[in-house]
Image (cartoon, rainbow, N blue to C red):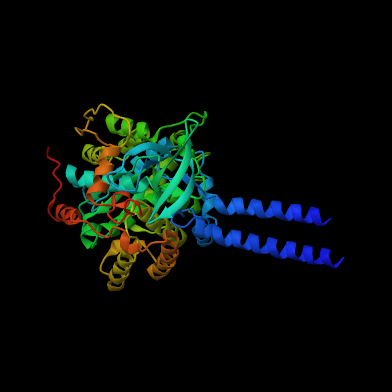
Amino acid sequence: MIRCFLSVFLLLIFSLHGLLQSDELYVSAKQAEVRDHPTRKAQEDPILPRGTKVESTKYKKKWHQISFVQDSENKTGWIYSGKLSPNLPEEDGSLVAANGNKLSGEDIAAGKAIRGVGPLAQKFANANRISTMHKKYLDYHHSFISMDKNFQPKVTEQGITPRRISAADIHKFLKEGKIGEFSESMPKEGE
Amino acid sequence: MKIYRVLVLAFFVLTSIALISCEATKGILNKGAEKALGPKNFQKVQKAAGGLEDLYNSFQETSIEDERSLGESVSLQAYATPSFGTPIRNDEMMLYVNCMANAIAQNSDRPMIPYHVAVIKSDIVNAFAAPGGYIFLTTGLILALDSEAELAAILGHEIAHISRKHALISMKRAQRLGGFAKVTSAAFENNFIDFEKLVKAMCEELINKSYDKDMEIDADTRGIQYAMNTGYDPRPFVSFLKKIQELQNRNAQGGLSSHPDTSTRIQEVENSLKKMEKELDDSFDTLVKNTDRFQTLQEWAKSSHSDWAR
């Protein structure tokens, strides 16, 4: 009887110990760059997509030291904490078509920017006598498109040329402002 | 017999201690990584929202294409509204605000769609968002700010309105979606008269009215979290809300009445900030409050005019 109690007790303690040690996190941002060390000069490879599970082994000054599996290989690195969450991020239901196919928000945005407003908005504009100039305002409004893929810009009917905002543009913006993962208040080498 | 009792007692006591410490340690283990939907904040927002989550889930069949069709129509209606103001045609300025918004959106609840920001020449201090990713900032708003971090929280707030589909939720509460079998472009086409009414009501609400307080608080708390996830100090958002409150008290700006009960919002944001700093496990002072370039943005807002002749 004593043995039985001891066995169950030890099993429970070991299980709890395991729970306390594990700190599973998920990439909640669009994507997260894994760095060799949390400095601006660190290599920014590999990139983990949203929803990737990682294990946090250390937390220091808004950076997580993490381990993860990629291509059946155990890898380690550092990720800025703003890109991680303890919860698995939910899938964006608006990016699943009625037939179950995946939609790309970026491709849809680029299509609108190149071809101008869609048929429903066009019908609304015609029915409400919205002027060409107001359509031109909207063309300009959605002519700056954040997207990973490159696309061939084409001047719209209203004379607006779409402009792609690449990941490099966003990095440049953050780097110039010393924001987040480009901040100067990061752990130093060896810290 | 006695030894069994002692063992049983020890078993339950130690198990309880272990379980309690496991719960307590969970928060510590997750510090710094708790996001907009971290369990505590999420529960708080859910409590304040009172059913927002169910309403949000009711739009799962609405695709990004459907949302954008609606957003395009609402934006066209806004641009055609007299006294709305015209967008500033300045590519450098557009690059600034669109890079910033999309950088913040990448750390939001809905990072997989592009967001489009336009700056409208208008003295009214206001910002608003239309479904599908359309964000409007007025030059009056940009000039009323003291830092890039304030703008980051405002953009976060508008991104949250879009990501949580507040415009659709608001229309559902106002019973303006009853004429559509589903909230899809096909249903809008089939009942075009009601679609026109919907677009006009939505536009009127965005420009001149308010969302319900639960949605504003939801957008506030998520917005500051998105800004902080990106690396901006979220505290300046309180300064912005206090500016709104001051202007509301002076009743000088009609547009500001679109955010009611500002005192409650300030209180809710301050409560969230306390929790966020604890979870960050670092001082907010280490985050970015301002940049040199922000002054350039304000200069553009002040001097740019709408050059639509070309």
Q: Residue B49's spot in the image, x, y percent?
A: 50, 59
Q: Residue B188's spot in the image, x, y percent?
A: 44, 37
**Which quarter shows the C terminus of chain B?**
top left
Q: Residue A180's spot in the image, x, y percent?
A: 32, 52
- Residue B276, picture quadrant: bottom left
Q: Residue furthest right?
A: B1
Q: Residue B256's spot in the image, x, y percent?
A: 31, 63
- Residue B80 visible at all: no
Task: Between residue A23 and residue A94, name the one nearer to us.
Answer: A23
**Which quarter shows the N terminus of chain B?**
bottom right
- Residue B218, picture quadrant: bottom left
Position of residue B23 in the picture relative to residue B306 (left or right):
right
Task: Between residue A83 and residue B64, name the one nearer to us.
Answer: A83
Task: Between residue B25 and residue B148, name the one nearer to us.
Answer: B25
Q: Would you place residue B143 above or below residue B77 in this image? A: below
- Residue A176 visible at all: yes
Label count reads 0
